[in-house]
Image (spheres, rainbow, N blue to C red):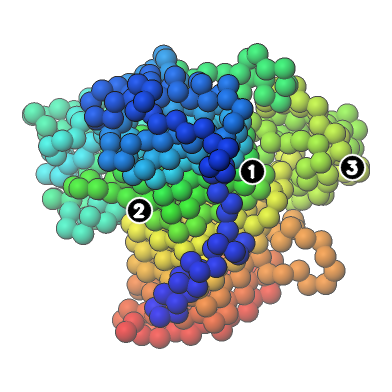
Amino acid sequence: MIHFLRFIILLAALLPCGRAAVASAAPHDADTLVIRVDEHGAVGDGRHDDLPALAAIVRGIERNTRPVKLVFRRGAEYYLAAHTDDCHGRILLRRVSGVVVEGNGARLTVHPSSRAFGVYRSRDVEIRNLTIDYSPLPYTQGRVTAIDTARWQLTFRVDRGFPLPRTGGKDVYSGGKFVDCIVANGRTRKFYQGHSWVTGVDSLSPRTYRVSYALNQQRQLRRGDFFCMKVAYAEPRLERNDTSSCAAERGEFVATNTGTVTALGCDGIVLRNLRFHASPMMTVVMKGCRRPVIAGCRIEGTGRRIVAGCSDGLHLKGCESQPQIIGCHFERTMDDAVHIKMSGDRVTAVASPRVCTIEHSDILWDNTNLGTGKRVMVFDKQTGRQLDTCVVMRYVPHDYRRGEVWLDHDVSGLREGMMLYLMPVGEALVAGCTFATQLQRAILTHQRTLVSCCRVEDNGIGLDLALMSDGIEGPPNQQVRVDRCVFRRIAWSVINDTCPSDGYWQNDSRGPGQPPAQLVVTRSEFHLDSGVRLLRAVRAHGVVLHGNTVYCRGALTPPSVLVETEHCGMVSDDTRVLAEP
């Protein structure tokens, strides 16, 4: 514990000058146009709909050539009402440069038919010092009054202040993210890991409902525990870029409803000191961004609520340069706190061993992030093997998801159905962060990542290195380092590292001799309950556990039981096992 605190202090001291230092997007004050939103129509009384005024202000910023600081009034509350067909359903910063949104500690209260911010193809944008919440809430919550696990049913009474669920069967609850539901301990308010899917809701009496569910039987559930399920609202109409002269942007979605804050194709975007208390889906989504930074932000519960976000906390996808996540706090998300991923592009036709056409594999509103000069892994998802790593010598986009690729050399065996995975620049950094009760994982990544000086408690898995879908995500697991972290009360396995094969370069390197280990865990503490593993690693090129200490509750567990490896390369382990003090 002393070591952990000491290095948090050291990390904080180094942030202004070390790798984690981030140049603020704030422009020089002498060059800056300062716009105070209250002087341009925003009211800030928490009742008046301020989105039309704020939308008009940011439209003016788009035409401005000077750096801009958009200033909210300290202590004010700005309400963004339901907008499904106008105002973009959010504060949309589009093709701007050098903009700071200074929240001044103000509050944004958003109707769940809208969202807070969208940032589209902008440069050097910082959003800071705001609290963001929703009203009404995008989920309902109550106490369990009856349980029938044999029939996969429960009854709950909705707490005052929460919306009522929609009644219906599979006509209402079939597929999609809004069938998710979770349960939590009625005394400790901690999530029971392992969510379920709602399959039907019946009204029994005012505020009392019977829920049928699937996926997990919830045998741990007791009367008096919390039940929570999402409530769907109409969402903003999605706008597409159908007029751009740039083929790579043609057809792309300017903003999506997946996150309370979303960013697409931005360079130098910073979120600083934002506090989120609710989100209808994910809290922050960044796609195809360069130099993304999230610093000092908090996703946290408030009042009697047991949920702070209805899906991932941070969902960082396709970012060419890896994100920096510094000094943040995450709790009560109904999925993973942090998910760092790179979606792949499927080869649709082959003209020669170095020329092919591709189409992006992920959901419709995601872009391919390929481009001339970028480096890609050529991967055969059927065999789990890497064919090559190449540089894209020329890329000709057909639209935002499809294009033609010229590689810098021939790739033997290149064929339709294989994947090209963009190899991002640098190493993702998660430093000085804390993770409290989550539904699933604290961190899910398969990118090169350093997790340093973090505290993880009450999660299903602390750190998961895995590909979660059939070839859509990639490249396969790259090197991950964990240093000076503390893990407590993990439900399943502290670290899971499941590589699809050993037939690819897991360290993003082809250097001579023994490559560095794919997973390196150093100087960390693990406080484990009985039956919980420290590590499960499958097909990793190398695993190094050095200078770590495991504290076990009850009888000491032998190191050979704490660490499970399968078809791994070099394994080095000097873990100390002690009784929990």
Name the residue tied to disc 3.
408
Where is the C terminus found, in terms of image quarters?
bottom left
Marks 3 and 1 in Cβ contact (< 8 Å): no
Disc assigned to residue 331: 2
Q: Is residue 528 above or below residue 492?
A: below
Crowding near pointer 2: few (<14 within 10 Å), some, many (20+)? many
Q: Amino acid at mark 2?
A: Glu
What residue do we see at 20% from left, 31% from top? 163
Q: Amino acid at mark 3?
A: Asp
Name the residue tied to disc 1.
290
What residue do we see at 45% from left, 77% from top? 6
Asked where in the image residue 553 lies, by quadrant, the reply is bottom left
- For numbered disc 1, what is the local secondary structure? loop
What residue do we see at 52% from left, 32% from top? 33
Q: Amino acid at mark 1?
A: Arg
Q: Earlier in the sequence, mark 3 or mark 1?
A: 1
**Along the line of sight, which residue is nearer the eye, 268 or 570?**
268
Distance between the alpha carbons at the discs numbered 2 and 3: 45 Å
Residue 168 vs residue 330: left or right?
left
Q: Is residue 542 above or below residue 276?
A: below
Query: Is residue 104 among what the camera can see?
Result: yes
Query: Residue 263, image x and y in percent?
Result: 54, 35
Where is the N terminus found, in terms of image quarters?
bottom left
Q: Is residue 445 above or below residue 228?
A: below
